[in-house]
Every structure is written in structure tokens, then in C-alpha cells.
Image (spheres, grey):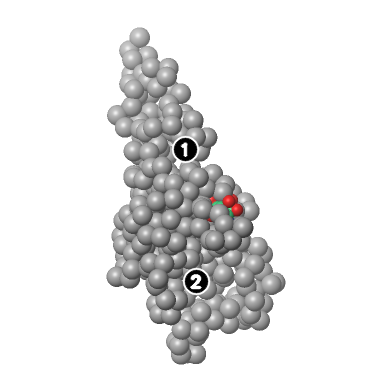
């Protein structure tokens, strides 16, 4: 599903003493079924932009296109439900939104609210729980007896139970330990690859952008500074350093080596790509030293 912004401005509390303009002339074209990453400093407007992606917020001026729907400032709040179903948002610390007595009821809440039968909602709860890596034994447990990471998985299963075409993730691994982070990022990648779910991820972690994303948007003070493939954007490493946005670890390392005279056939973004570049060089050096 295509998502496109055309000249979007957004102002909180317009025409009041608290008026604050947060998004400025956003033109954005998020490729269909991509794994996109939105990066930018704190306060740059990422969460505000995210909420336009499923019409939780409407632009103050301009247009947002979500699939075949067009959202303008005049769009009525009625009939937005189908968009909310197609585009699921996992907010920061989603576990704080769990509320039901059992895991099964919590996950089934969304579909039931959309008129899905009791039976089908229960089936969805079981399927989505498995998808997030928890077995059926969790279904009848209270969500509040689970670990933080498990609670987060249950909350994500609740969003998945709506069977969205696009999943929006606002810093989904915040506060998790390194293993929990990796497991969760791998899970989203599997959902993307195996189920064809489009992902739009907000993150500060450039290693995650490099590892998973095929499209990237850089926001600064409410304006889109760059959009494109991460390899293009990370290529301008001087710009990223100047903006203090962070650079993937492997790319930073490769740039250090380039400054010392090493040549690469393409800019490595991940550890795997870096080792693919380095191995032939090291093997060549080994052959040379063996010959000596
Ligand atoms: N509900 C609101 N009412 C008024 N102003 C708001 C509201 N939500 C956010 N803002 C303001 O909008 C600006 C952008 O905030 P936003 O949360 O979109 O940025 P962000 O890039 O997501 O930041 P972070 O990385 O810290 O989550 C900030 O100056 C913030 O104070």
C-alpha cells in the first residue's frame, strides 16, 4: 500500500496562544511494502508524522494519501476506521496499554471491536501470539504477570490481530536488553518478509536502519532533509556526522579504513557487508605474506 504526503503542514493547537507548527511542507513517498525507517533528533516531529500515517492526526494543510484514501484538513472523522485497520501503530512502550484480564482477551479486543466474531477473534489471538513467539500456554494468563518483553509481545500481537497491511513501530525496542532487541527486530523482519507486511520504523539506532531498512527518511525540525535508500544517505557520512545523527558502526569503521587508504567496492553498511569487503583483501595479503 502506497503512502504519500503532499505539501503537508501540521500545527498543534492552531489559533491559540499554544500554537506550535511542527511539520513543514512535507513531501514524502513511502514505497509500497517497503521496510522504511524514519530518523531524526528528539522533537523533530517523528511521532507527529507517524500519527498522520493512519489518520490519527489530519494535516493542517496539504494532503496525505493512504492506499486509495485521501486525507485533507476537511476529511470527516467518520469513515476513518478502515484506515486504522489497514495501518497498525505500535506506540512507544505499548505494554502500558494492556488492560484486559487475560492475554487472549487483550489480543482479541481489537478484532472484536471491528465486528469480528468471538470465535474468529479467539483464533486470531492464538495465531498472533504464536507469531510474536509465545505459545498457547500464555493465552489464559494475566498480561500483568508477564515480563516486560513478553508484555510488549502481547501488545504487538494485539495490533497484528487487526491484520494490518502496514505496521508502524515507534522505537519498538526501547528499554529491551540486547538479546530482546535483536529477537524483536528479527521478528519484525520475518513479518515483513514472510507475510508481506510493510514496516515503518522510527528509531535512533542507525545499525538497525542499516540492517533492515530499504528506505529511509531523515527529519530535522519538522522538515524532510533526505529520503532514499539507506546506502545513498549513509554515503554522505560527513553530512550525518555534521547533523550528529549517528552512522552505522560498520560504515564508521569502513570510513576510518578509507581514510587510511583502503578501498572498498561498495560502502559497507553492516558487519556482514564489511566482512565481505575485508575478507578478499585479507586473503590477498595472506597469499602475499605466504609468498615472502
Ligand atoms: N499533543 C501535543 N500538543 C502540543 N505540542 C506537541 C504535542 N505533541 C508533540 N508536540 C510538540 O511537537 C514537537 C515534535 O514532537 P514529536 O513528538 O512529534 O517529535 P519526535 O521527533 O517524535 O520526538 P521524540 O524522538 O522525542 O519522540 C515537539 O516540540 C513537541 O513539544
94 vs 276, left or right, is right
Question: Which quadrant would residue 35 be assigned to in this image?
Answer: bottom left
* In this view, 166 is above or below 38: below
> In 3D space, how far apart are the residues under numbered discs 1 and 2 (Cα atoms)?
30 Å
Image coords of residue 97 (percent x, y): 62, 70
The residue at 38%/38% (across/down) is: 233
Image coords of residue 181 (percent x, y): 55, 53
122 vs 64, left or right, is right
Mark 1 vs 2, N-terminal side: 2
Image coords of residue 139 (percent x, y): 58, 79
Question: Which quadrant would residue 63 be assigned to in this image?
Answer: bottom left
Nearer to me, 250 or 98: 98
Question: Which numbered marker is on residue 159?
Answer: 2
289 vs 147, left or right, is left
Is residue 234 in view?
Answer: yes
Q: How many marks?
A: 2
Question: Which numbered marker is on residue 248?
Answer: 1
Question: Which quadrant would residue 116 be assigned to in this image?
Answer: bottom left
Is residue 39 in view?
Answer: no
Quadrant into which the N terminus falls? bottom left
Give the quarter the ligand 1 occupies: bottom right
* In this view, 244 is above or below 80: above
Quadrant into which the C terminus falls? top left
Nearer to me, 133 or 98: 98
The residue at 55%/54% (across/down) is: 20
97 vs 65, left or right, is right
The residue at 52%/64% (across/down) is: 90
* In this view, 169 is above or below 218: below
Amino acid at each position: 500500500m502506497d503512502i504519500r504526503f503532499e505539501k503537508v503542514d501540521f500545527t498543534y493547537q492552531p489559533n491559540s496562544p499554544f500554537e506550535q507548527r511542527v511539520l513543514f511542507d512535507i513531501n514524502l513517498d513511502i514505497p509500497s511494502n517497503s521496510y522504511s525507517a524514519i530518523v531524526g533528533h528528539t522533537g523533530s516531529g517523528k511521532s507527529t508524522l507517524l500519527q498522520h500515517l493512519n489518520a490519527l492526526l489530519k494535516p493542517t494543510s496539504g494532503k496525505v494519501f493512504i492506499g486509495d484514501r485521501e486525507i485533507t484538513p476537511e476529511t470527516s472523522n467518520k469513515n476513518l476506521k478502515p484506515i486504522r485497520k489497514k495501518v497498525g501503530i505500535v506506540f512507544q512502550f505499548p505494554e502500558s496499554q494492556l488492560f484486559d484480564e487475560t492475554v487472549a482477551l487483550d489480543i482479541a479486543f481489537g478484532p472484536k471491536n471491528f465486528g469480528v466474531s468471538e470465535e474468529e477473534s479467539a483464533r486470531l489471538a492464538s495465531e498472533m501470539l504464536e507469531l510474536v513467539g509465545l505459545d498457547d500456554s500464555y493465552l489464559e494468563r494475566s498480561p500483568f504477570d508477564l515480563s516486560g518483553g513478553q508484555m510488549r509481545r502481547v501488545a504487538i500481537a494485539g495490533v497484528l490481530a487487526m491484520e494490518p497491511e502496514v505496521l508502524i513501530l515507534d522505537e519498538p525496542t526501547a528499554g529491551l536488553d540486547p538479546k530482546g532487541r535483536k529477537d524483536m527486530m528479527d521478528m519484525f523482519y520475518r513479518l515483513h518478509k514472510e507475510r508481506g507486511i510493510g514496516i515503518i520504523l522510527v528509531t535512533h539506532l542507525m545499525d538497525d536502519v542499516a540492517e533492515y531498512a530499504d528506505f529511509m527518511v531523515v527529519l530535522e525540525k519538522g522538515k524532510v532533509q533526505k529520503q532514499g535508500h539507506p546506502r545513498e544517505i549513509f554515503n554522505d557520512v560527513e553530512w550525518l556526522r555534521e547533523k550528529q545523527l549517528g552512522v552505522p558502526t560498520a560504515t564508521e569503521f569502513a570510513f576510518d579504513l578509507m581514510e587510511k587508504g583502503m578501498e572498498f567496492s561498495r560502502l559497507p553498511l553492516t558487519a556482514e557487508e564489511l566482512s565481505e569487503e575485508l575478507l578478499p583483501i585479507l586473503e590477498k595479503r595472506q597469499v602475499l605474506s605466504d609468498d615472502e
